[in-house]
Amino acid sequence: MSKIHVTTNVNGDSVEFLCEPDEVLLDVLRDRLNLTGAKEGCGTGDCGACSVTIDGRLVASCLVLGAEAEGRVIETVEGIGSAKDLHPLQRHLLEHAALQCGVCTPGIIVAAKALLAENPDPTEEEARYWLAGNLCRCTGYDKIIRAVLSAATEMRGENA
């Protein structure tokens, strides 16, 4: 098979890569672009560990072909905050002790950011529903939901 040339935007940067026609975006991100935040948890789109956004839409990168990234805007967890300037979601997950092993954390951050972009003031039920596709085997979900709602309050400029 001949490789496919793809030009796309990842985390605000123009990126070009070659990929196999059947290569999934998750593998392209990790193996070709060295963006290892998205994790392969299941390979079937059921766990959320590989969540990214494409043109603002939350997707499981294990279910999208790398070739489908052509001309799209992709955001991974690496594009959200930095070690020196954490995004409120990252900071609140730390403050609420809402992470442990870290496999699910990148996907949860990406999914929560997508939620708050669409609904900056979600109810607990709305947040739980939105994040239901992100499985966490360590912390349970109460601390994660509290952290997301707390970050949402801060992002709206309100006092907690």
Image (tube, rainbow, N blue to C red):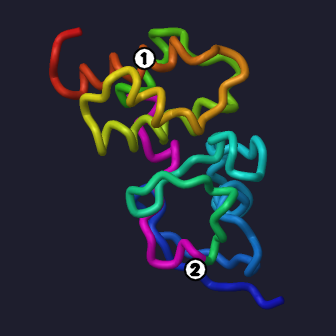
Residue 136: give x, y in percent of width and height. Answer: 66, 25
Residue under the point 30% across and 29% down: 122
Q: Secondary structure at mark 1?
A: helix
Decide if residue 1 is on the left or right side of residue 53.
Answer: right
Q: Which residue is mark 2?
A: 6
Decide if residue 13 is on the left or right side of residue 29.
Answer: left
Rendered view: 123 above or below 28: above
Tell me the quadrant of the picture where the N terminus can be found.
bottom right
Rendered view: 122 above or below 62: above
Rendered view: 130 above or below 146: below
The front one of 30 and 26 is: 26
Q: Secondary structure at mark 2?
A: strand
Residue 31: give x, y in percent of width and height. Answer: 74, 59
Q: Which residue is mark 1?
A: 147
Q: Quadrant of residue 146?
A: top left
The front one of 105 and 33 is: 105
The local crowd at label 2, few if under 14, some if 14 to 19, many if 20 or more residues have their Cα within 10 Å, is some
Q: Amino acid at mark 1?
A: Ala
The front one of 45 and 25 is: 45
| Residue furthest bottom in the image | 2
Q: Which segment did they paint magenta?
A: 68-86
Q: Quadrant of residue 103?
A: top right
Q: Residue 158: which disc?
A: none
Is residue 84 found inside the magenta-colored segment of the image? yes
Q: Amino acid at mark 2?
A: Val
The front one of 89 and 117 is: 117
Is residue 37 found inside the magenta-colored segment of the image? no
